[in-house]
Amino acid sequence: QKEVEQNSGPLSVPEGAIASLNCTYSDRGSQSFFWYRQYSGKSPELIMSIYSNGDKEDGRFTAQLNKASQYVSLLIRDSQPSDSATYLCAARTGASGGSYIPTFGRGTSLIVHP
Amino acid sequence: DAGVIQSPRHEVTEMGQEVTLRCKPISGHDYLFWYRQTMMRGLELLIYFNNNVPIDDSGMPEDRFSAKMPNASFSTLKIQPSEPRDSAVYFCASSGPSGVTGNTIYFGEGSWLTVV
């Protein structure tokens, strides 16, 4: 059973602070990792994808991947109230032949208060 | 690109009625996924297709649920008969070919189903 685990939160941070969201996965065959943001009543939208160990930065967002520890994180710098949403972590294998199933975590609710 | 297009966006139906949800994936994508999202269970994968062929339908909750993909640009998820516990948001998503890169999953806006 492939699993992606996230703390459901809510994670509450003050405006301007760094928000740190964490995710662990069980399938060592996972090769692609994604962070989605979902506002209430909306569909998930992709924020970041990461495939290699280390950090990947995009604006205020940094994704971190540690395959040895099976750990993915998302850092949001200078958090804004508009970042308040649920953040979904997803892991996916790179294999073909029918095992190409993305597994999503339950999501972490982030609240950024002014 | 218009993205993944789903219809209807909202549906309210009576218990026992047939519900058909529709999806048009992003052109060129060869994977199509149907998800259901509820507060209790989060985002659940119901079924996915590769090149229009159903690959894994183990997430389909019951025989009342069925899905088809007659061509690369259209898929349906049908519930017959519908029950109140089917009330949820149903997302269709698509992605490009397998491989380490270029395989981002894109979601449609969702179909909000309420069965009364």
Image (cartoon, coloured by chain):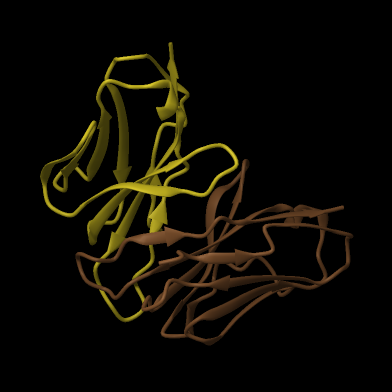
Chain colours: A yellow, B brown
Residue at image position (25%, 24%) is: A77
| Image quadrant in which the N terminus of chain A is located | bottom left
Q: Locate residue A79, reporting x and y percent.
A: 33, 22
Q: Nearer the viewer, residue B67 or A62?
A: A62
| Quarter where residue A12 is shown | top left
Q: Is residue B80 above or below residue A15?
A: below
Q: Locate residue A67, reporting x and y percent.
A: 16, 48
Q: Is residue B11 left or right of residue A68?
A: right
| Image quadrant in which the C terminus of chain A is located | top left
Residue at image position (45%, 64%) is: B3
Give the number of marks.
0
Residue at image position (36%, 78%) is: B28
Q: Locate residue B41, reporting x and y percent.
A: 59, 47
Q: Is residue A65 above or below residue A79?
A: below
Q: Nearer the viewer, residue B62 or B45?
A: B45
Q: Locate residue B102, reporting x and y percent.
A: 24, 66
Q: Is residue B67 above or below residue B114?
A: below
| Quarter where residue A56 is shown | top left
Q: Is residue B85 left or right of residue B91?
A: right
Q: Residue furthest front?
A: B1
Q: Nearer the viewer, residue B60 or B107?
A: B107
Residue at image position (38%, 61%) is: B105
